[in-house]
Amino acid sequence: MQIVKRNIELRVDDSLMRVYVASPKAEGKYPGIVFYSDIYQLGGAILRLVNYLAGFGYVVAAPEIFHRIEPVGAVIEPDDIGRMRGNDDARRTLVSEYDADCLAVVDFLKNDSAVNAEKLGTVGFCIGGHLAFRAAFLNEIKASVCCYPTGVPSGKLGQGVADTIHRFGEIKGKMLLVFGTQDPHIPDNDRQTIINTLNAAQVTHQVFAYEAEHTFMRDDGYRYDSAAATAAWEKIIAFLGLHLN
């Protein structure tokens, strides 16, 4: 499916938040996706994922998660300096600010003429996987995909301690989790804590683990694993198709 691309601006707490939107070219009503990047924001590797997903028939909206700190359009390089910069941006952002951004993107999707407001989901990677977990607290979100979500058991997300894992009972939609078994940022005990807590909260979920490292789905890094990434995307597309179409 061919897609069209645009950038929109949303005002959240008097800060301009750029949102990259990719959507099917053909007119119609499509499910909407709140798409969360990793700490490097909307660079080429992430935009390729946004565009890829949109081609399956979704209006995908990806906000700049550090818009209160970084200038509009800023892309953080995925190197050692960029990693420090991105992690510092994350540390300086309030959890409540992330939540406000989510509400703004969901409101945009609900009012976009190409979106079926009854069929909203979320997809996120790394810190974005954690943000997708929090998006799942909203009743509007029917399906959530969290790829190697960092900081969920510890509450590490922004300023203060995020209460994410204590709120799993609020999740009403379906969830799909993607992990790398060689990921030191989400070791086995953290993965099991997330899964056990989802079970206790009676959240319907699927879990797929691949023999891969952190960020193995990002195609511009040395940890990229094309076979594992392709396998994960097959599961993601099937999951979203089942629950949003």
Image: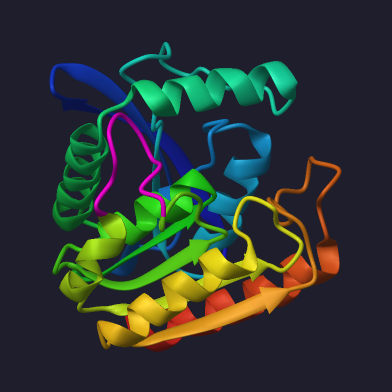
Q: Is residue 41 a member of the stretch shown in magenta?
A: no
Residue drawn at (27%, 33%), measured in percent from left and top? Answer: 160
Residue drawn at (61%, 58%), measured in percent from left and top? Answer: 52
Residue 33 in view: no
Give the percent coordinates (x, y) of residue 5: 48, 42
**Horizontal side, residue 28 vs residue 55: left or right:** left
Name the image colouring.
Answer: rainbow
Q: Quadrant of residue 220?
A: top right
**Horizontal side, residue 225 vs residue 161: left or right:** right
Magenta residues, as a range? 154-163
Q: Quadrant of the N terminus?
A: bottom right
Q: Nearer the viewer, residue 1 or 90?
A: 90
Q: Is residue 158 a member of the stretch shown in magenta?
A: yes
| Image: 105 above or below 11 | below
Residue farthest along the front direction in this orientation: 189
Q: Quadrant of residue 167?
A: bottom left
Give the percent coordinates (x, y) of residue 244: 34, 79
Residue drawn at (20%, 78%), measured in percent from left and top? Answer: 172
Residue drawn at (46%, 55%), measured in percent from left and top? Answer: 129
